[in-house]
Amino acid sequence: MRVTAMMSSKRQRPVVTALLATTMIAGLTAVQAKAQQAAPPAGAPTLAPPVAPAPVGTIRAINVTGTQRLEPDTILSYTKLRVGQPFTQETLDQGLRDLYETELFADVQIRNDNGTLTVEVKENPVINRIVLEGNKRLKDDKIRPEIKLAPRQIYTRSKVRADVARIIELYRRQGRFAASVEPKMVQLDQNRVDIVFEITEGPKSKVRQINIIGNDKFKDGELRSQMVTKQSRWFRIFSSGTSYDPDRLAYDQQKLRQFYLTEGYADFRVISAVAELTPDKQDFIITYVVEEGDRYKFGDVKVESDIRDLSGDGLTKRLPMKKGDWYNAKLVEDTVDTLSETAGLFGYAFADVSPDFQRDKDTLTMGINFRIANAPRVYVERVDINGNTLTQDKVVRREFRLAEGDAFNSFLVKRSKDRINSLGFFQEKLDVEQKPGSAPDRIILETNVQEKSTGELSLSAGFSSLERFIVSASITQRNFRGKGQELRTSVNYSAYSKSVEVGFTEPYFMDKNIALGGDIYRRDLNSFRFLGNGTNSRDTTYEQTTTGFQIRAGVPITEYMSLALRYSLNFDDVTLDRATYYSDPDGAGPLAERCDPLLAGRYLCDAIGKRTTSSLGYSLIYDTRDNRIRPTRGNNVVLSQDFAGLGGSVKYVRTRVNASKFWPLGAGFIFSLSGEGGYIHSLEGERLDPDGNPTERIRLVDRFFLGEPQFRGFNIRGVGPRVKRYFLQATTDENNNITGYDRVTGRNNITDDALGGRIYYQARAEVEIPLGSGAREMGLRPSIFVDAGAVAGIKDPVLINGNGSFAGYCDPTTNAPTGSTRVRATGTARAPVCGTNFTFSGGNFEEEYLGDTLKPRLSVGFGVNWNSPFGPFRIDIAKALLKEPGDDTKLITFNVGTQF
């Protein structure tokens, strides 16, 4: 590659040097001549006046050569050389400088031939294209907007150097301080060039070490934990804080100061903070020099109020700090905010709270006088809403707890903000700004919202440890027509469940604070159990088809309490596979078309049938959460009851209670406690099974079940009453005579049917753990948890212990049964029936009823939510610490899907 501008400059240097030397010699000669003609008198100053250089000649003609794109007149217009004017050597030198300053030329020469000047130029090339090579971390669309050079522009070295500096600065912002850029020029015909920026990105510069000098009171590790910048270590692969950032360096100095001030060191200061790049430009070493100073305690603290509605003495008694406590600057800041909010509660929006510090270095105490300056009581002049393009103003305004003309109240402003955030229509960084109105006692509440997508159109496919393969399609619009209405339709299909549902909710019916909505649905559920065949396979037990609708209405009672009413009408059909669970599916014999308890169990035979459930219910809701979608503080309590029996064939009362509370622990940690429980009471008389035995009045499909996914550490329906069928293996003596039967051990040799219960409870404690910004961008939200609960309270089922099966077989020629008989649970003997698919292996079994106890089950574990490239992913690892005989535990549960 040949950089023409650099080569041309070298060629011109002798010419320029000669011109400058000639000018200097001519000047010296003129000065000497003047000195000889007029010698100064004795004692007079010897300084000679400046002498203009003598003209070399007069310009008779100017010729321009070497032009390609520029006109000769255009080139001459950049200089002061004109025909007919006298010129000197200095005039020619200035002409050279003027032409070079245009940056249009790679080489310029001016020759004088007895007054005829020849200006010979070589134009800088035109850029044909800009090529970026080697950039993988920063794509072209990030770099090209920063480059000033562009095709069809004139090439200059200064512009290339500037673009190189811009590209390197882009990489430094990404933490890649080892990045380098090598510009190259490819010569083309017609004086055109391609500019190629060869980029070597280099690794991301990490923080290898953070050194702290001057700290005696706290260890280095404790101080490093306060910083956002972290030392690069293998276990911080998901943290973005290990890369060097100059802005973060300044922020960490503030974090150190805040930490020391909260510990009482009021004189602390950071003397210097230096970041040194290692010679290989791979890492940074950061060194802080600090001066801790002395530790202070609180002196006299009090509140002085100029506002008549606020008593200074009363507020002083409620101050969180007392004389003699260690000084804490964060506590002072929080107190100022609290006092400002207190003034706001009384309508003084612009009350000025200023702490006056009295530092005593002799006693090492810090006295504070919180002064609340007088301010007028403020009223809301106007509520402004900006940024909503789809959402109608009234949707936002109806969430405000303040209206024009109301007395200002800071608590109601915060409550309004929480309610708007809970809509889920706007970005989370929403705030209600308080601006001065047209008078001192007027305030304007301005809400700047940024709308986010509220419509979802998704086709999903995934795999769940609960339902295996899942396919679903849904259309949801949570802000339909910008009126805050919710419209949703969904179709779901998996190996064990199918559903179609359409729903609509109007949160403010007829612009009144009344929510009205409804759902129409069809749900098919195939309940399953593990087979006792030596494998981990499952089969379908009963199939439940539910078709129905629900109408809902909700009204607020107070700011935090509301009442929801609902009416549901469901048509249920519960069936069993006749070929598997019926004694005579072909209609032959005395037990035709009858569920056989020997095959299905009495609990399954009791569940089949068609029924209609007409129920009326209500929910009493108390909700103080700051955000209903992702709460960080507040309570939520729900009491629900449903009364079935307003027509239909099912009669019961179901009662449920749910409660949860959230606490922010600081630094992004969120702790939550939640609990729930329920009880269902039958309003029907005694029910009998097909054999005339009393049975549980609450049907199987109406009971409570507990397990995966709500109770982590246990399998689906893995907690509570169940019947386990153990297969028996005959034991023989030395003469091969059967002496007894032993259970075949192993979970996969046991058929397990969960029966549910009439009463249940569950409690959870969970801590959400914050991660670095890099992990947050990936959507990682880990948590640790403790789950506890139980379900119980049904009538003991009648168990079956069978000792026979198809010992004989159907004759393939006559299709008639042959061989021995089979013993039913009632003791009635009959021959086996051909055509059945009853493939009992061995035939000997016994049943056992387990798990009907309210003793708590307990599990602990951790889980992670991840917005993966394949869709939402949740994995939980939980260990059951307390369990009862019969419970089914499970260590790992997960769910993953993808949207396309």
Image (cartoon, helix red, strand yellow):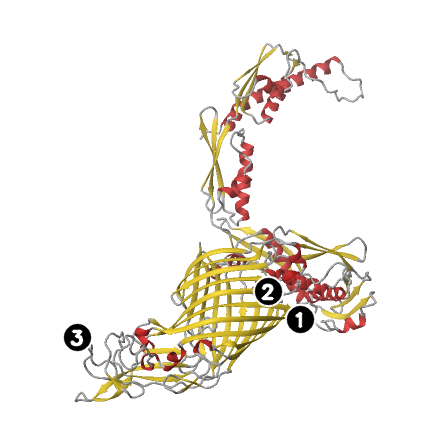
Q: Quadrant of the N terminus?
A: top left
Label 3 close to label 1 by CB (< 8 Å): no
Point out residue 695 in the picture as x, y percentages from the top left corner. Answer: 42, 85
| Amino acid tagged 2 | Leu
Mark 2 or 3, nearer chain start: 2
Residue highlighted by disc 3: 814
Looking at the image, residue 578 lies above or below residue 31: below
| Amino acid tagged 3 | Thr
Q: Residues within 10 Å of mark 1 (few under 14, many from 20)?
A: few
Residue highlighted by disc 1: 557
| Amino acid tagged 1 | Ile
Residue highlighted by disc 2: 516
Front residue (pair 18, 436): 436
Q: Residues within 10 Å of mark 2 (few under 14, many from 20)?
A: many
Front residue (pair 223, 102): 102
Left or right of 762 on screen, residue 722: left
State the residue at coordinates (74%, 71%): 319
Point out residue 462 in the picture as x, y percentages from the top left corner. Answer: 41, 61
Mark 1 or 2, nearer chain start: 2
Front residue (pair 621, 169): 621
Q: Secondary structure at mark 2?
A: strand
Q: Residues within 10 Å of mark 3 (few under 14, many from 20)?
A: few
